[in-house]
């Protein structure tokens, strides 16, 4: 490559970066026109492009930039007022210059296109009927290529090819593996010198690893910088008013991940403007401000980067999703009828799904959210969607800080070692023989453990991987409590080793289809261990699809007023067609199912034989004045226990277990309830169990008193 080629490449890089900043400045200037420093910065950028393009013999680029410079000169001198027309014209100039730079980079020559559609608009702002001839450049006497701190930009930054950084990161990964192997032998060699040298190697390797990772880290604001223009143009095209707010622009993550999330983020933002936020008239009719609000928020949490895209639009109508899903053949009518709100919302990520009424250049082709989820999951991230109809939608993305070197917990099962990424680890629980026998229960055929009053689904790693059972009855049980998609489950393993920094190696082509593995690593002894994919493991074991640990919808739209409880765990049940009820999970002893043939009569009461006792049954829907539960096939029973006595509360079905703060309303309007609350976006009766039992089975209270 010749020296002139190097100069041209440097010009293209600097000019592209300058235009990116210029575009951001124009959008800010549109909101705050009286900002002379920002206007001067915009002028300097165009002036630099014009002057350098003349030096590099790029006359077309110089001519277009020159006309734009004239407009900016009038704005800077106060002869022209900054308004929307000026903003639109200058943004068109940015687009034209960017296309010209792209063409020059691709071909080495200026494009032969006609740019009069841009220059004529610029000339009109200058009060000229057509493009003015190029005039001599004004002096740049008071300007200097310095950053705000006063240092020369060339002295404070350097550009490094990303490929070189990737190679350097790979070498550091190999060094980490070598360091781990050396540390394995420290205890076996009785040498103070070797131990001291190993510690020094460990320290230097750790510092080098952190330093190299920092060179790859970039603020997420680099991705967000292009979104204000996307929102502005799309809002204008849709006839909407949208205010974009961004929090946490300085949050850093690996450049590889920055590039991977760029397109998914853009798609989500476009969806929020197109589908989420309503037109001004509709918002006003709903009692909202005419201008919609779109919030982008990023922050670090638990070794991951959390990105939230929040809009205050119309939200997602689950019934509309149900109808569209059936009409498009995504699910059958029978499947759709059994789905709850969260499962219906998850259909938005199904391939080919779209709720758009018609196909436009923005949406309606059924290509989108499924690709977004695939791209996010490809880099080890997760995406979750929560919506409150009428209030808005929140999309929450979790992605790792980097993909190269991660801390992990090493566990064993069936004699093999596996690594679990530490970002998914919550805690470790060890149960001795008696605790395991008493603490592990079966609900609907699935093992669970009651951890601090909350039911924790259990997954046996050896069973999930099809490996032989090596534990014997009475052995202690080790449970690794993991988080997957805001839900928790316990992974039962044979043993736990120490945590260790591991270098992630991709799986071979033949193994990439296995959902429970995220990659492989080389351990300190040189042996290969597989890295578990916590999300894939939870999905393969049906932990996520069971609904037992689904997180409640966010508190968007709920207000702290009299009657608001602290966050509680509720058991939500069906009390008949379109009716829901909830009780605190702490009041529930067990969930049971009985065949209708097991139900007997004693006096005027339905009863069942339960754990050596006769347990009376109370039909909850009937005592709420609703349609009685049909006593046929299987019946669902919530066991409520006080002292040595138990009573079975018959419900139409078990819906979910949720964590949520609730606002109690309509306190005395319904029989045997404490009132009503909105849980998961649905009006739900809060059962008063004491009142229900007192009303439906007063003799049970007497029996309980006698037993006490």
Image (spheres, rainbow, N blue to C red):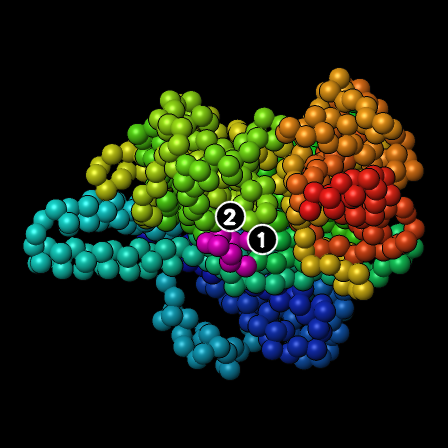
Residue range in magenta is: 299-307
Element under disc 1: strand
Q: Quadrant of residue 46?
A: bottom right
Q: Residues within 10 Å of mark 1 (few under 14, many from 20)?
A: many
The dot on residue 399 is 2
Asked if residue 306 lies in the magenta stretch, the reply is yes
Helix, strand or loop: magenta stretch: strand
Is 647 positioned to the left or the right of 576 in the image? left
Q: CA distance from mark 1 to mark 2?
A: 8 Å
Q: Quadrant of residue 74?
A: bottom right
Q: Is residue 88 left or right of residue 17?
A: right
Q: Residue at x 69, y 39 (%)?
A: 645
Q: Is residue 84 magenta?
A: no
> Which of the pair 636/506 is nearer the observer?
636
Secondary structure under tag 2 reads strand
Q: Are marks 1 and 2 in contact (CB under 8 Å)?
A: yes
Mark sitting on residue 307: 1
């Amino acid at each position: 490559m010749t020296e002139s080629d190097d100069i041209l490449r440097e010009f293209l890089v600097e000019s592209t970066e300058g235009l990116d900043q210029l575009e951001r400045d124009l959008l800010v200037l549109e909101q705050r026109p009286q900002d002379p420093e920002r206007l001067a910065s915009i002028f300097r950028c165009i002036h630099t492009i014009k002057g350098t393009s003349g030096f590099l013999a790029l006359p077309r680029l110089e001519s277009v930039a020159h006309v734009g410079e004239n407009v900016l000169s009038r704005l800077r001198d106060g002869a022209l007022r900054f308004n929307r027309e000026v903003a639109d014209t200058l943004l068109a100039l940015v687009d034209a210059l960017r296309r010209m730079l792209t063409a020059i980079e691709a071909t080495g020559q200026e494009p032969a296109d006609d740019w009069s559609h841009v220059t004529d608009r610029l000339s009109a702002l200058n009060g000229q009927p057509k493009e003015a001839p190029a005039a001599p450049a004004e002096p740049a006497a008071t300007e200097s290529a310095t950053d705000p701190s006063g240092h020369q930009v060339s002295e404070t930054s350097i550009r490094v090819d990303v490929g070189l950084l990737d190679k350097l990161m790979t070498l550091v990964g190999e060094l980490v593996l070598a360091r781990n192997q050396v540390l394995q032998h420290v205890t076996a060699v009785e040498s103070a010198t070797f131990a001291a040298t190993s510690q020094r190697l460990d320290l230097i390797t750790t510092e080098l690893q952190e330093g190299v990772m920092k060179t790859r880290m970039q603020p997420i604001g680099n991705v967000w910088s292009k979104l204000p223009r996307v929102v502005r143009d799309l809002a204008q095209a849709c006839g909407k008013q949208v205010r974009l707010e961004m929090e946490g622009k300085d949050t850093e993550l690996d450049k590889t991940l920055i590039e991977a999330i760029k397109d998914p983020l853009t798609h989500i933002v476009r969806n929020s403007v197109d589908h989420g936020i309503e037109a001004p008239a509709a918002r006003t009719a709903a009692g909202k401000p005419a201008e919609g609000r779109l919030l982008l928020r990023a922050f670090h949490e638990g070794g991951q980067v959390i990105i939230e895209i929040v809009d205050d639009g119309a939200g997602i109508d689950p019934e509309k999703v149900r109808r569209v899903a059936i009409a498009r053949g995504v699910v059958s009518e029978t499947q759709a009828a059994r789905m709850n709100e969260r499962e219906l919302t998850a259909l938005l990520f199904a391939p080919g799904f779209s709720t758009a009424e018609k196909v436009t250049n923005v949406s309606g082709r059924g290509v989108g959210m499924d690709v977004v989820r695939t791209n996010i999951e490809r880099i080890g991230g997760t995406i979750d969607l929560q919506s409150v109809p009428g209030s808005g939608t929140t999309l929450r993305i979790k992605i790792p800080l980097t993909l190269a070197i991660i801390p992990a917990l090493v566990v064993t099962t069936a004699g093999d070692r596996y690594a679990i990424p530490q970002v998914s680890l919550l805690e470790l629980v060890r149960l001795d023989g008696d605790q395991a026998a008493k603490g592990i229960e079966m609900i609907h055929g699935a093992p669970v453990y009651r951890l601090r009053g909350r039911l924790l689904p259990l997954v046996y790693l050896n069973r999930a991987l099809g490996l032989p059972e090596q534990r014997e009855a009475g052995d202690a049980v080790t449970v690794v409590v993991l988080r997957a998609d805001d839900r928790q489950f316990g992974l039962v393993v044979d043993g736990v080793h120490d945590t260790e920094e591991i270098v992630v190696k991709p799986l071979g082509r033949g193994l990439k289809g296995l959902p429970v593995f995220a990659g492989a690593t080389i351990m300190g002894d040189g042996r290969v261990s597989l890295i578990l994919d916590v999300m894939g493991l939870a999905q393969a074991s049906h932990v996520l699809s069971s609904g037992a640990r689904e997180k409640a919808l966010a508190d968007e739209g709920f207000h702290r007023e009299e009657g608001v409880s602290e966050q509680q765990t509720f058991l939500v049940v069906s009390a008949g067609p379109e009716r829901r009820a909830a009780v605190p999970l702490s009041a529930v002893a067990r969930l049971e199912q009985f065949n209708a043939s097991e139900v007997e009569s004693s006096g005027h009461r339905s009863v069942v034989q339960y754990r050596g006792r006769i347990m009376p049954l109370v039909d909850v829907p009937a005592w709420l004045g609703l349609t009685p539960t049909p006593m046929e096939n299987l019946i669902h029973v919530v066991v409520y226990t006080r002292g040595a006595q138990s009573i079975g509360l018959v419900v139409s079905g078990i819906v979910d277990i949720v964590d949520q703060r609730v606002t109690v309303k309509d306190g005395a309007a319904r029989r045997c309830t404490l009132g009503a609350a909105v849980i998961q976006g649905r009006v739900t009766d809060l059962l008063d169990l004491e009142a229900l039992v007192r009303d439906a089975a007063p003799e049970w209270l007497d029996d309980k008193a006698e037993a006490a």
